[in-house]
Image: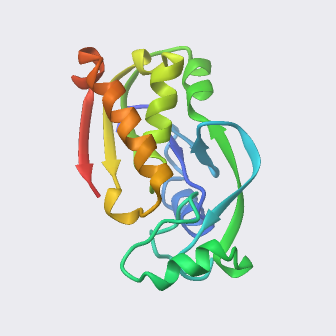
Amino acid sequence: LGAEVHAFEPNPIHVSAIKERFSNYQNLIFHDCAVGHTDCDEAHLYFKGSSDDDNGGASMLPFKITTDASEVSGRFNHDPGMTHKVATVDLTRYIFELDKDIDILKIDVEGLEYLLMWRLLETGAVSRIKHIFFADHRQNFIVKFWFDTAAKTINEIKSHPDVMSKMHHRHA
């Protein structure tokens, strides 16, 4: 209450619930799309079950796993029942266009956290943020590219004490 909140949600089931529950809040600026490291009109949201499953495990990455390794096969196969086309908004562009500092940025994007964090560092958008709450989903990934991106980003964060002091993370 009292804070201006900018929220992004690509899952159509959650979009409906958010719009219904928070429709009376004038301080919520809601976007029914995903945040990403680029703008894109044709991205895919991959579900671990069907697209009408309210599962919370949906990701913009097709290789995320949770508890059942068989879901990896379904995500890689791009089964239309397990994907949903969504738009993505470049988070750094969005931050710069706000033209004001951000008190809190919560990043919990089911696997794209390190890529977004790298982009925040690369563009300097991180300087506009006071606190960053960051989910780490490392137990859900088995792909070398993901770990290479995470390691590169962690090393970059460690080289900037001012950024380190902003970070608050948890293993999701």
The residue at 45%/23% (across/down) is 121
Relative placement, left or right, of 119 versus 93 is: left
- The answer to whether residue 68 shows anywhere in this view is yes
For the C terminus, the quadrant is: bottom left
Relative placement, left or right, of 31 versus 58 is: right
The residue at 60%/82% (across/down) is 50
Q: Position of residue 162 (x, y in %)?
A: 26, 15
The residue at 35%/56% (across/down) is 137
Q: Is residue 143 above or below residue 133?
A: below
Q: Position of residue 169 (x, y in %)?
A: 25, 42
- The answer to whether residue 2 shows anywhere in this view is no
For the N terminus, the quadrant is: top left
Frontmost residue, 20 versus 158: 158
Q: Is residue 80 above or below residue 85?
A: below
Q: Position of residue 150 (x, y in %)?
A: 39, 42
How many numbered marks appear? 0
Q: Position of residue 82 (x, y in %)?
A: 64, 77
Q: Is residue 165 above or below residue 85?
A: above
Task: Give the colour scheme shown.
Answer: rainbow
Frontmost residue, 112 versus 1: 112
The residue at 68%/60% (across/down) is 44
Classify residue 56 by image quadrant.
bottom left
Frontmost residue, 101 versus 132: 132
